Amino acid sequence: MDLFAAIREAMISHARRCLPEEACGLLAFDGAGALRRAYCLANADHSATGFTVDPDDHFRVLGDAETRGWTVGGVFHSHPVSAATPSRTDIARSLDPTWLHVIVGLVDTDVPDVRGWRITDGEATEEPLVLVPPIASPEEKGGA
Ligand SMILES: [Zn+2]
């Protein structure tokens, strides 16, 4: 999965801003399956060890993505003090095997680790994220 540098930076900035709580957001994909935006949202749990996307935010994002011809097909969240691998809770709470789960690990806040996962039947498999240089921001690339 290609990951635009601007999207990676957006997730990292959000994760740092939300410290010491976990940050979260939703991921939107275009018709070709490319990741186009990370919506940075509020963690309704305000927890350092868990997250729930604010339901109003979730609803608003679905509408925004739809108007752009995108589909919400993933979620990202941060691990303030642990690695960018899914926790048992992350795996247990994952309902849709088609979703991409991105985790921002902030064990070293200066060198964040951003990794992608698919979670199927209680098992997490890494989906490698290939950083795409910021030649054009995803918002400016093509578009309707
Ligand atoms: Zn987690």
Image (cartoon, rainbow, N blue to C red):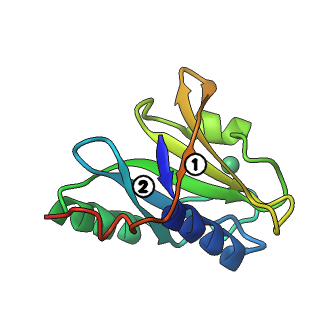
Q: Is residue 30 above or below residue 17?
A: above
Query: Which mark is first along the chain, 2 or 1?
Result: 2
Binning the other alpha carbons within 10 Å of mark 1 as few (below 14), some (14 to 19) or many (20 upward) gives: many
Q: Residue at x 61, y 34 (%)?
A: 92
Q: Position of residue 87 (x, y in %)?
A: 72, 40
* C-alpha distance separating marks 1 and 2: 9 Å
**Is label 2 within 8 A of ligand 1 (CB to nearest ligand atom)?**
no
Farthest residue to the front: give it: 135
Drawn side of residue 25 relative to residue 141, left or right: right
Q: Which residue is mark 2?
A: 27
Q: Residue at x 64, y 67 (%)?
A: 12
**Which numbered dot is residue 86?**
none
Q: Dots 1 and 2: beta carbons under 8 Å? A: yes
**Is label 1 within 8 A of ligand 1 (CB to nearest ligand atom)?**
no
Viewport quadrant of the C terminus: bottom left
Q: Nearer the viewer, residue 82 or 139?
A: 139
Q: Amino acid at mark 1?
A: Val
In this orientation, does residue 44 appear?
no
Q: Is residue 122 above or below residue 34?
A: above
Which structural element holds mark 1? Answer: strand
Q: Residue at x 73, y 47 (%)?
A: 84
Q: Position of residue 128 (x, y in %)?
A: 59, 36
Q: Residue at x 78, y 72 (%)?
A: 20
**Which numbered dot is residue 102?**
1
In this orientation, does residue 83 appear?
yes
Drawn side of residue 33 relative to residue 96, left or right: left
Q: Position of residue 71 (x, y in %)?
A: 27, 50
Q: Nearer the viewer, residue 46 or 15?
A: 15
Q: Amino acid at mark 2?
A: Leu
Drawn side of residue 54 relative to residue 107, left or right: left
